[in-house]
Amino acid sequence: MENMFSKDTPNTLARLGERLRAERLARNEPQARFAARLGISVPTLRRMEQGDPTAQIGHWLAALALLDRLADAEAFLAPRPSLFEIAAAPKTRQRARSKP
């Protein structure tokens, strides 16, 4: 079976897991209590913190909401302006600085 993840995926997930753990620890919240508040098991939380690619995105969104960081998820696949929108945008001119 072909690997469905890019070679960078494990590193990205590991960094996200480290950040999740750091956020939890910054709030002085033990894994058991944090997992209970998320409605997941401690092993599931541990897998998320270790960057396991099988962790459900719903669990990640619940964790972001619990950490008051749900707005961060809005950047996932955020719409990008099309080339037509970029070309049609008014150009702003920069004024040349006068030499001293």
Image (tube, rainbow, N blue to C red):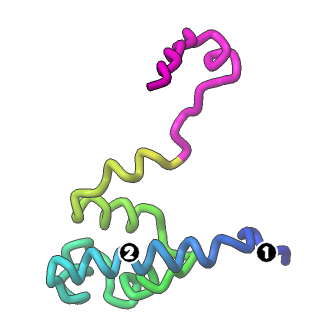
Residue 8, placed above or below residue 100: below
Q: Which residue is mark 2?
A: 19
Kindly state the secondary structure of the residue where label 1 is placed: loop
Q: Position of residue 52 (x, y in %)?
A: 54, 81
Q: Nearer the viewer, residue 27 or 94?
A: 94
Residue at 31% across, 53% down = 70
Magenta: main secondary structure: loop
Q: Which residue is mark 1?
A: 3
The C terminus sits in image quarter:
top left
Mark 1, other Cα within 10 Å: few <14 / some 14–19 / many ≥20: few
Q: Answer left or right for 24 relative to 48.
A: left
Residue at 38% across, 67% down = 59
Q: Position of residue 93 (x, y in %)?
A: 54, 13
Residue 72, placed above or below residue 22: above
Residue at 71% across, 70% down = 5
Kindly state the secondary structure of the residue where label 2 is placed: helix
Q: Which residue is situated farthest in the right direction here? A: 1
Quarter-wise, where is residue 62 in the image? Answer: bottom left
Q: Nearer the viewer, residue 85 or 79?
A: 85
Q: Position of residue 67 (x, y in %)?
A: 23, 64
Q: Identify the magenta region.
A: 77-100
Q: Earlier in the sequence, mark 1 or mark 2?
A: 1
How many numbered dots are placed on residues in this image?
2
Q: Answer left or right for 5 relative to 93.
A: right
> What residue type is disc 2 on?
Arg
Q: Answer left or right for 10 relative to 65.
A: right
